[in-house]
Amino acid sequence: MFNPVQLQMLRLISEAGPLSRTELAGRTGMSKAAVSLLTRELLDGGLLAETETVRGTGRPSIRLGLLGSSAHFVGVSLVEAPVVMVLTDLNGKLLGRHEIDWSNDASEVGRLIAAGLPALTAGRANVAGVGVALSGYVDPSQTRCLKSTLLGWQDVPAASLMEAEIGLPTAIENDAKAVALGERLFGAIRDKGSFSLISVGDGIGCGHIINGRLYRGSHGGAGEIAHATIEPDGLPCRCGKRGCLDTVASLMAIQSSARTAGLPGDVKALEQLASNGHGEAIAILHRAGAALGLAIAQIIQIIDPERIIVTHRHGALDGLYGTVTRATIEANVLPRIAGEIDIQFRHVSADIWARGAASIAADKFLSNPVLHQKDVV
Amino acid sequence: MFNPVQLQMLRLISEAGPLSRTELAGRTGMSKAAVSLLTRELLDGGLLAETETVRGTGRPSIRLGLLGSSAHFVGVSLVEAPVVMVLTDLNGKLLGRHEIDWSNDASEVGRLIAAGLPALTAGRANVAGVGVALSGYVDPSQTRCLKSTLLGWQDVPAASLMEAEIGLPTAIENDAKAVALGERLFGAIRDKGSFSLISVGDGIGCGHIINGRLYRGSHGGAGEIAHATIEPDGLPCRCGKRGCLDTVASLMAIQSSARTAGLPGDVKALEQLASNGHGEAIAILHRAGAALGLAIAQIIQIIDPERIIVTHRHGALDGLYGTVTRATIEANVLPRIAGEIDIQFRHVSADIWARGAASIAADKFLSNPVLHQKDVV
DNA sequence: GACACTTAATTCAACACGTGAACCAATAGG
DNA sequence: CCTATTGGTTCACGTGTTGAATTAAGTGTC
C-alpha cells in the first residue's frame, strides 16, 4: 500500500514529532518533489495531518504530524492480575483503560479481550491491532509463546488463538521487551540510539533497544538478567540455578527476606526502618542494591548503551536500595564509560505493561499500515 | 559508483560464496533482467568473476564469485610486538606476511607501515586500504583512538596520522572487535546472525556481531568484559576497580598467580601440573575458568547470541581451564537457552589480530568499492 | 505600502531504473 | 534429434524520482 520511503517518513515523524515537507526531504534524502507526492498520499490516507505552521523568514513551513486518530492500538498486560487493557493512539496517547479477569487459557484470554473491547474503545474506530505483554519467551514472529512459567505455557501459539477470538491482528511479546519498545515508540526516548530498560517489580526484566530497534536475541532471550548469576553459590532459584539476580533484588525476594527476618515485607516500610538505622533492613536493601547495580554494570560493560532506564513502582528505588544500586553501578563500570552513560530511575504505574503491549501493535502497524475490517463494529 | 543493490550482491557473495545470477535475483528480490545488468557492471569493474558452471537439468548455471585480486587489504596488529602486517584479498585469503618494528607514535607507525608495504605486497596492485588493530577505544568513524593504555594514547587521530604517511585509506579498530569482524567477513561464520567472540590471550577481549554487523556500543565500549567485575572485592586491577575478569582469567593473570605460588608461569606447564593433581595449579586454573565461564554466561544471558566463539593461543583452553569454563557457562545460563547456543573453542595464531585488522579495511571497501591512486606505485 | 528578498511547496517535462515477457542458450534425457 | 528444463539476455514499457521552473506565503526595508 505505502512504499518504504513513506513508512520511513512515518517513523521519522513518530520519532521527532511533526516535520515540514522540506525537513522530510532532508532526512529521507528524497527530493522535495518526491516528498510532495508521497506526503499527499499519506495525508489522503489519513495518516498524516497538517498540524502547525512555523513562521520565519520566507514562506512559513507547514509541519506534518501523525494523525493520532488514524489508528488505535489495544495493549493488554497478562503480567499480573487484574489484567489491564489500554487503548492508545498512534502517538502513544492513552485514550482508555479497562480491566478484565485473569485467565491462563489463550483462547479464553482472547474472548475476555474481545468482550472488553467495546467498553475500552468507547465507539472509537480504526483499531489497528492488539498487543499482549506476558512474562516468558516469545518467538521472533511474536505469535508463539515458547515458554512461560507464570502462565504454564510451552510452545503455545497464543497470538493466533487470541486473534481467532478478537478478530484483530494480535501479537504477543515478553513484558520487559514490550516496555522497552513502548519507551522507544511512545515514550521520551524516541531516537535511533541504544538503551537498556530494566524494570524492577515483583520480578526483574530487561529489554534492549539497539540502534533504535528492539533487539530480541537469537532465542528471544536477550535481557534475561533476572536469571543472571550475581551471587555464585547464592540462594537456589526456581529456575534451578543459584544466586540469580531474581533471588536477591526483586521485590518478591526482598519481601521474602524481610519476612524471614521478622520484618514487614513492604519496601517502603523497610526503607523507613533502614533510614532509622535498623541493621537487618539495611542489610537486605544493601544486598538487593548491590546485586542490581552489579547486573546493570555487567550490561553496561557488555553492550555499552547510551542510556540505562530503571523503572520501578511504589517508589521502590527511592531510598537506600536505589542509592546502593547507583553506587554499585558507578563502582563496577570503567570510569571513562560510567561518566558517559545517562542512567535514569523512573517511577511508573502498573499500566506500563499494557502501554508497552500497545506499542508492539503500533510497531507492526508502522511497518505495514493497513486498517482492517473490524473498524466499524 | 555502484548502487546499493550491487553492494548487497557483493556482500551476499562474500557470505555465501559464488552465486549464480538466478540465485542473486532470488536473494536480492530483483528481477533476472536487473541482475543481468548489474552483475555485468560488477564483472566489467573487475569485482566479480565467473568461477564455475554447475550442471543440472536445463542450462548450467554460472556462479559468480568475488574476484579476490580485485582488491587487497593490509592488516596491521599493534597489539603486541612484533607488529605483524598481513596482506589479504577480498575473500580473506592470506597473501603475505611481514613484521615491522614497534612504535607508539602514530606517524612513526604510519612510516613503518609504508616502508613495509613493498615487501608485503610483492608487487601486487589494488591495495584498497589498511586496517590497524589496537588495544583501546576507537571512535565510531574508526579514525580516532579515544584511549589506549597500552599505547599511551588519549584522543589521538591515529588513522589520519597514519594515512598521511601511507597514502592509502586507513582505519583503526579495537583488537577484539577487529577479530570478530574478521570472523564475520573472512572466517567461518559469514552469515547475518549474531555471535560474540571472546579472545583469550595475555588480556581478554570481546567483540559482538549483531544481526551480521559489528556492534561497537555507544562509546566504542561494547564487549569490554576484561573489566567486568567477576569477583566483587577481588584483586585490584590496573583500571582502578577490583575483581575484574582480567585480574583472574587472562594469561597474564594466570602467569602472575602461578609465579606468586612458585609455579611455572606457562599455562601448558601449569595444566600439566594440574593433570598430575597439583592442588595449587588446579586452584589457579579453576579460578580462571570459573571467572571466564561466568563472564560468558553473563554475555549469553544479556544478549542471547546464536554463537559464542572463544579464541585462544598456545592451546590455553585445552585443559582444565577450558573444561571449567565450559562447565561454568553451562551452570550459569538458563538451561533452555544453554542448549540452543553453539559454543566453540578455537585455536588461533598470533596473526589473527592482523587478519581482523585487514577485515576492517575490507568492510569499508565493501561499503564503497573504490580503488585508489596508489595502485601502481 | 510597494518592493525586494527568502524560504516552502507544487508542478511538469525529462529521465533513469527496474520489470515482464519474449527470446536465446546450453544442457540432460529419451 | 527432439523435448523438457533451467539459466541468462534483450528490449519495449511503465513507474517513480528528479531538477528546474513556478507558485505561494510570509518578513524586512525604505
Image: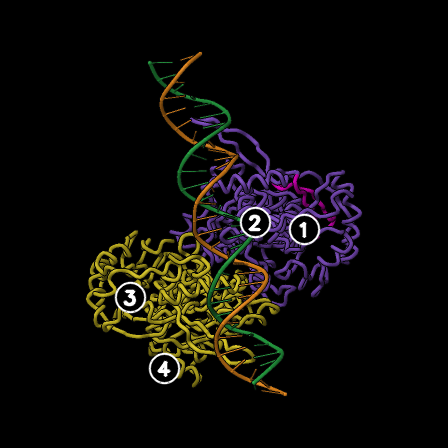
Chain colours: A purple, B yellow, C orange, D green
The answer to whether marks 1 and 2 sit on the same chain is yes
Of circles 3 and 1, which is in front? Answer: 3
Of circles 1 and 4, which is in front? Answer: 1
Residue A223 visible somewhere in the drawing: no
Q: Amino acid at mark 3?
A: Val
Q: Chain of mark 1?
A: A
Q: Amino acid at mark 1?
A: Gly
Residue linked to disc 2: A3
Residue linked to disc 1: A131
Q: Chain of mark 2?
A: A
From mark 3 to mark 1, how far is it between C-alphas? 52 Å
From mark 3 to mark 2, how far is it between C-alphas? 40 Å
Residue linked to disc 3: B127
From mark 4 to mark 2, how far is it between C-alphas? 64 Å
Label 4 close to label 2 by CB (< 8 Å): no
From mark 3 to mark 4, how far is it between C-alphas? 43 Å
Quarter of the image containing the C terminus of chain A? Answer: top right
Residue linked to disc 4: B269
Local packing at callout 4 (Cα closer than 10 Å; few below 14, some 14-19, many 20+) is few
Local packing at callout 1 (Cα closer than 10 Å; few below 14, some 14-19, many 20+) is many
Give D26 or B205, whichever is nearer the viewer: D26
Give A30 or B212, whichever is nearer the viewer: A30
Residue A70 visible somewhere in the drawing: yes
Of circles 3 and 2, which is in front? Answer: 2
Q: Position of residue B14 (x, y in %)?
A: 43, 68
Label 1 close to label 4 by CB (< 8 Å): no
At a point 62% along the width and 49% down the height, the residue shown is A1
